[in-house]
Image (cartoon, rainbow, N blue to C red):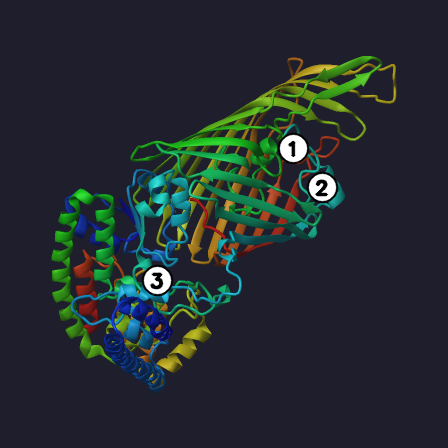
């Protein structure tokens, strides 16, 4: 209707100009005649258009009335019959043609502020994770427990009772035709962190993609995943041992290549700063006393090189995904514990192997088995000042070699659309540590079992009950301290959050 | 080329003929909202010249992540990408959206492929896209399109005629999956087995639904192939309505082998 009115107005306003130009050079009589003619024509046009307007009005009211008269028809139905289908199909009369549609899309002339960019707001989501924790040892004791040579004390800041684990802001948007940008910004009660912020390319040919910024390394299966897509409330012992509580996330560049093969085959390489405290580190070390010093310059920067290969095949309803990963870098660790300064430098290599098998029963049910194995080799020089207050006692310096490995294996069954149940077994199976070539006597059987039951009302909310029996923890006197924990966890997401990878 | 659902695959093959090689991600037996983004799909998308999707948020759970991982610049822009929902007007476009109302699609109901009258629009859009990408074979595509439309035209008239006996009958469906079909056959939709889109039924909702269905004299319960069947059968039994298992896409039932036989089967099951 508005368009029609607008056209009439434009016609009326334009007509004098048209007339003046057309009639230029003619004598007055002829001009008058022409004028009359034109006015008549316009009169006719206006009458026709008025009739059209009336008809349309009548139709519109009619449609509305019939809508009221038939309460059982779904709301959009009357609208459908009058205008919904574009184009003329199969000789049926559809009143709106695509051109008319185009005109009606012309923006209204009186917009208050025409430079608004609100339509370009990126996808924003917020994920909140909290838990209630029950444990058979108190927080003081738990804080001091460690997994010998794997995880130093203070392994987890989860307290008994209520925990607010994180509130994570996630942003994602295309930058331009060439790049996408994503950022993960977890808030905790003590501060904010820029956990991930990276661009990815989308214009490179031949199956290449480059990622740059700060991101979770694609080493292995679990490491690249965000905590909220994990199947359990906590990370496996293995990942926490080799990459720390937050996993391997670094500043750097990743390049990956998807091979032009009928099966999925992805090769990737990462050059990373290598600041990860659990296995690497870049800072210069210095431990001095009485003019003697144990010192080492900072590591090369960038310091860490990661490469990986991943492949997948489908066999009927079964999907298999496997990967091999390798990480190599220099190590600079400040191992100072309490009042005993200790530092270490050297080289570290980590090898990883992962396999996931997922059997899809139907659209809502599946059985998933996921396992990962890693081997770490560290060759270190360690300096210790065992008596910092006694100037007469010299620094002790020794060579240390670590050959360590472990795995986790987890089975998850989504037995109903909203329910999942799962079990996980963690084992750190090799812990060979040599000091100056002498093998140390360290405890074995560092294992843990976990079980979980999950209720997931929609893809945006999760409630999870998890039980852990942890057999890997030791106190200050190297006595094993079995720890039982129960987690009641919630994880919820609001806003525009993209779907997750396989 | 890669397409998300079997019906798009069939349309593309009908128009493209031997000039195209089509890989279909989803199966007719699966819930179209929850296709798993398997790595094997990434390998298929890597070499694709064209990705055709249904659109309107139906693929939101798997297509964006697959495109991100496919390292294929062709499907990253509008040249090698076709969203069919952009070609047709959608019904049930909500004035406002909230996830409190379940899995609502802000763009409107995405299951438009179940309206036989919308299929020619989709076919034409696919033809235009194929001509865009492969101009030298355009005449061939146009010829195939014309053939398809001719057949479809006569079939649609036949289906319209057969469905005309159903006009005004009242139905219940599981999910708002058959709304376009209901509209095209002038059936009247009384309610859904799920209380809100994507939310499984509760005992109380079923009770209320049965009450409404009784007072409205519902005649058919339209059940899709991928949701649980018990609730629908229970309601049908309680109110004495006919329980009809309807395919929503090619492959959902063995009889639905292509688009024509899909609609043939839908009409047969509805009018039987």
| Residue occupied by mark 3 | B110
Q: Quadrant of the C terminus of chain A?
A: top left
Alpha-carbon span between mark 3 and mark 2: 53 Å
Q: Quadrant of the N terminus of chain A?
A: bottom left
Tags 1 and 3 both on a single chain: no
Horizontally, is B114 left or right of A383 in the view? left
> From the viewer's perspective, is the residue at label 1 or at label 3 nearer?
3
Give residue A90's quadrant in the image.
Answer: bottom left
Q: Where residue B170 appears, x then y in whole percent?
A: 29, 79
Q: Where residue A159 appears, x then y in whole percent?
A: 70, 48
Secondary structure at badge 3 equals loop
Horizontally, is A491 left or right of B240 in the view? right
Horizontally, is A365 left or right of A171 in the view? left
| Residue occupied by mark 1 | A151
Q: Is residue B179 visible?
A: no
Q: Where residue A375 appears, x then y in whole percent?
A: 53, 26
Give residue A336's quadrant in the image.
Answer: top right
Nearer-the-camera pick, A187 or A180: A180
Q: Chain of mark 2?
A: A
| Residue occupied by mark 2 | A142
Nearer-the-camera pick, B123 or B160: B123
> From the viewer's perspective, is the residue at label 3 or at label 2 nearer?
3
Nearer-the-camera pick, B67 or A188: B67
> From the viewer's perspective, is the residue at label 2 or at label 1 nearer?
1
Above/below status of A276 relative to A91:
above
Identity of the residue drawn at 80% across and 21% down: A386
Residue A248 shows which numbered tag? none
Secondary structure at badge 2 equals helix
Above/below status of A455 relative to B232:
above
Q: Chain of mark 1?
A: A
């Amino acid at each position: 209707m508005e368009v029609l009115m607008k056209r009439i107005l434009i016609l009326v306003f334009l007509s004098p100009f048209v007339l003046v130009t057309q009639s230029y050079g003619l004598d007055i009589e002829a001009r008058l005649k022409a004028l009359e003619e034109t006015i008549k024509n316009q009169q006719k046009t206006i009458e026709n258009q008025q009739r059209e307007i009336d008809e349309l009005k009548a139709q519109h009211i009619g449609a509305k009335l019939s809508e009221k008269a038939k309460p059982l028809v779904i709301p959009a139905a009357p609208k459908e019959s009058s205008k919904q289908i574009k184009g003329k199909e199969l000789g049926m009369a559809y009143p709106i043609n695509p051109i008319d549609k185009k005109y009606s899309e012309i923006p209204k002339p009186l917009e208050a502020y025409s430079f608004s960019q609100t339509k370009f707001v990126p996808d924003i989501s917020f994920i909140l994770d909290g838990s209630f924790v029950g444990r058979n040892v108190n927080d003081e004791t738990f804080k001091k427990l460690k997994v010998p040579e794997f995880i130093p004390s203070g392994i987890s800041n989860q307290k008994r009772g209520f925990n607010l684990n994180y509130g994570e802001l996630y942003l994602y948007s295309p930058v331009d035709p060439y790049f996408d940008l994503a950022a993960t910004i977890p808030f905790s009660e003590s501060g904010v962190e820029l956990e991930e912020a990276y661009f990815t390319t989308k214009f490179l040919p031949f199956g290449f993609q480059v990622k740059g910024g700060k991101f979770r390394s694609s080493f292995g299966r679990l490491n690249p995943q965000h905590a909220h897509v994990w199947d359990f409330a906590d990370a496996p012992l293995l990942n926490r041992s080799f990459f720390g509580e937050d996993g391997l996330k670094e500043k750097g560049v990743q390049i990956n290549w998807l091979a032009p093969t009928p099966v999925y085959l992805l090769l990737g390489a990462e050059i990373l700063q290598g600041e990860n405290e659990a296995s690497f580190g870049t800072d210069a070390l210095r431990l001095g006393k009485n003019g003697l010093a144990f010192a080492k310059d900072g590591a090369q920067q960038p310091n860490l090189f990661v490469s990986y290969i991943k492949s997948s095949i489908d066999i009927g309803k079964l999907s298999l995904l496997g990967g091999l990963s390798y990480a190599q870098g220099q190590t600079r660790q400040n191992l100072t514990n309490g009042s005993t300064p200790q530092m270490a430098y050297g080289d570290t290599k980590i090898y990883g192997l992962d396999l996931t098998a997922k059997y899809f029963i139907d659209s809502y049910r599946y059985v998933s088995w996921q396992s990962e194995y890693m081997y770490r080799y560290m060759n270190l020089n360690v300096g210790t000042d065992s008596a910092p207050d006694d100037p007469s006692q010299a620094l002790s310096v020794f060579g240390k070699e670590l050959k360590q490995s472990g795995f986790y294996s987890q089975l998850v069954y989504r037995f109903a659309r909203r329910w999942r149940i799962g079990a996980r077994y963690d084992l750190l199976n090799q812990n060979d540590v040599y000091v100056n070539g002498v093998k140390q006597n360290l405890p074995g059987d560092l294992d843990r079992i976990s079980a979980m039951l999950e209720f997931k009302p929609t893809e945006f909310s999760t409630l999870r009950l998890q039980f852990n029996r942890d057999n890997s923890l030791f106190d200050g006197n190297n006595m094993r301290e079995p720890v039982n924990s129960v987690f009641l966890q919630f994880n919820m997401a609001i806003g525009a959050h993209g779907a997750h990878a396989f | 080329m890669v397409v998300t659902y079997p019906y798009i695959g069939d349309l593309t093959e009908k128009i493209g003929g031997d000039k195209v090689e089509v890989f279909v991600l989803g199966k007719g037996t699966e819930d179209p909202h929850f296709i798993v983004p398997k790595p094997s799909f990434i390998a298929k998308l890597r070499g694709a010249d064209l990705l055709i999707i249904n659109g309107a948020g139906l693929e939101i759970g798997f297509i964006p992540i697959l495109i991100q991982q496919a390292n294929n610049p062709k499907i990253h822009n509008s040249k090698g990408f076709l969203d069919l929902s952009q070609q047709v007007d959608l019904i049930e476009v909500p004035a406002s959206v909230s996830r409190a109302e379940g899995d609502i699609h802000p763009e409107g109901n995405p299951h438009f492929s179940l309206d036989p009258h919308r299929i020619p629009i989709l076919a034409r859009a696919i033809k235009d896209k194929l001509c865009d990408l492969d101009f030298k074979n355009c005449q061939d595509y146009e010829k195939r399109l014309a053939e398809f439309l001719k057949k479809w035209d006569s079939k649609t008239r036949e289906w319209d005629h057969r469905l005309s006996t159903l006009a005004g009958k009242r139905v219940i469906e599981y999910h708002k999956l058959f709304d376009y079909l209901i509209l095209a056959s002038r059936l009247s939709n009384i309610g859904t087995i799920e209380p809100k889109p994507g939310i499984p039924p509760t005992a109380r909702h079923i009770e209320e639904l049965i009450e409404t269905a009784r007072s409205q004299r519902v005649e058919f319960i339209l059940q899709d192939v991928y949701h649980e069947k018990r609730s629908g059968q229970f309601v049908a039994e309680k109110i004495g309505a006919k329980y009809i298992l309807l395919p929503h896409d090619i492959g959902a039932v063995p009889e639905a082998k292509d688009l024509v036989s899909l609609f043939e089967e839908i009409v047969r099951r509805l009018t039987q």
